[in-house]
Image (cartoon, grey):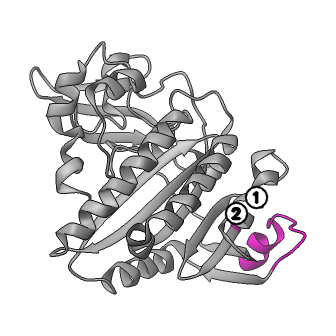
Amino acid sequence: LSVGGYGVDSVSLGPQTDLVQRLHVVPYSGDPLWCSPLEHPEVFRLSLAGMGQAGLIDRAVIRTESKANFTALVTQDHSNFAAMIDSLQPLAAGCLRPRLFKALAARGRYVTTYGAVGCSRSEARDQLPNLASMNRRWNFYRYRDWRNLGVRIWTGSMPRQVHQWVDYLMPYSALVRFAGTLEQLQRERPEFKRHLQAIFVLGVRRQARRSAACLEATSSFEDDLLFGIGLYSMVKRADISAQAAVSAALKECQSEALTLGARPYLYGWHQLSDLEVQALYDTSQFPASKLMSSGVRMHDAAIHQ
């Protein structure tokens, strides 16, 4: 809750911060307190996705729903990255309203996945979106456990790697333009392309706007549906020159993303200047200098590992 929280469910449920009703926060000075949109609303707004700037969240009251153990998925293969991004237009236009969504470009494959959940296999299957072209159908019991295992196996297959991972939130029109820049950058920077192990795209549909978190990446947009795009580079810890090359390419990606009006997911890699922080966020409560020195910029050097 201190970083935002996005996943395959965010296309229907939004970030995890949208599900929070109350927080118990331990400030760095003063007494612990409960906060919500109605009680100490500023503390609530600055604590959600606040990267610990306001204090430590030690308890939370979160809106929940009955657990559905069965997940049904349909996947579509695409010929290239541009085709994968183009295929998301019906989702962006609201023609598709899936419960789950993700798109992944990795290991030479470009795949979009849509899903539904239910208390039985048939219930989940019957709620799948109607897609014109489907390559495969999947049915899972406790899908999230399998998905977490897959991520662990993937990261475990590349030991002793520095994770130079960056994520941005943006509208679909900006995503299309950003994807074009990204493809060009990979052609021009072979070192970057070699270490960019995966590009991951999510949908994020905001559920609540009245208590927009100060630093939460979707909070300044009016669009009903945003897209998150993550660039996941893995570089050997000892290869300093490769890390520098990837960082330079990611800096160009950051510049393009900010030009397009995107917002960074602060949990990952970034190199935001004080002026960029002031332009992106309401720093009236936390001046930019304090914001940058208090931990948000720590991923600049330490890098998400």
The residue depicted at 58 percent of the width and 70 percent of the height is 104
The amino acid beneath tag 2 is Ala
Residues rendered magenta in the picture: 114-134
In the picture as drawn, the residue positioned furthest to the top comes out as: 284
Quadrant for the N terminus, please: top left
Q: Percent x, y for residue 179?
A: 61, 55
Question: Residue 33, relative to residue 183: is it above or below?
Answer: above
Q: Percent x, y for residue 178?
A: 59, 49
The residue depicted at 32 percent of the width and 46 percent of the height is 270
According to the picture, the residue beneath numbered tag 2 turns out to be: 82
Local packing at callout 2 (Cα closer than 10 Å; few below 14, some 14-19, many 20+) is some
Pick the residue in front: 245 or 10: 245
- Is residue 30 toward the left or the right of residue 192 in the image? left
Question: Residue 234, relative to residue 153: is it above or below?
Answer: above
| Contact between labelled residues 2 and 1, with CB atoms less than 8 Å apart | yes
Local packing at callout 1 (Cα closer than 10 Å; few below 14, some 14-19, many 20+) is few
- Is residue 239 toward the left or the right of residue 199 in the image? left
Pick the residue in front: 33 or 228: 228
Q: Is 123 a magenta residue?
A: yes
Under tag 2, what secondary structure? helix
According to the picture, the residue beneath numbered tag 1 turns out to be: 86
Q: Percent x, y for residue 102?
A: 61, 64
Q: Percent x, y for residue 221?
A: 58, 29
| Residue 139 falls in image quadrant | bottom right
- Residue 65 appears in the figure: no
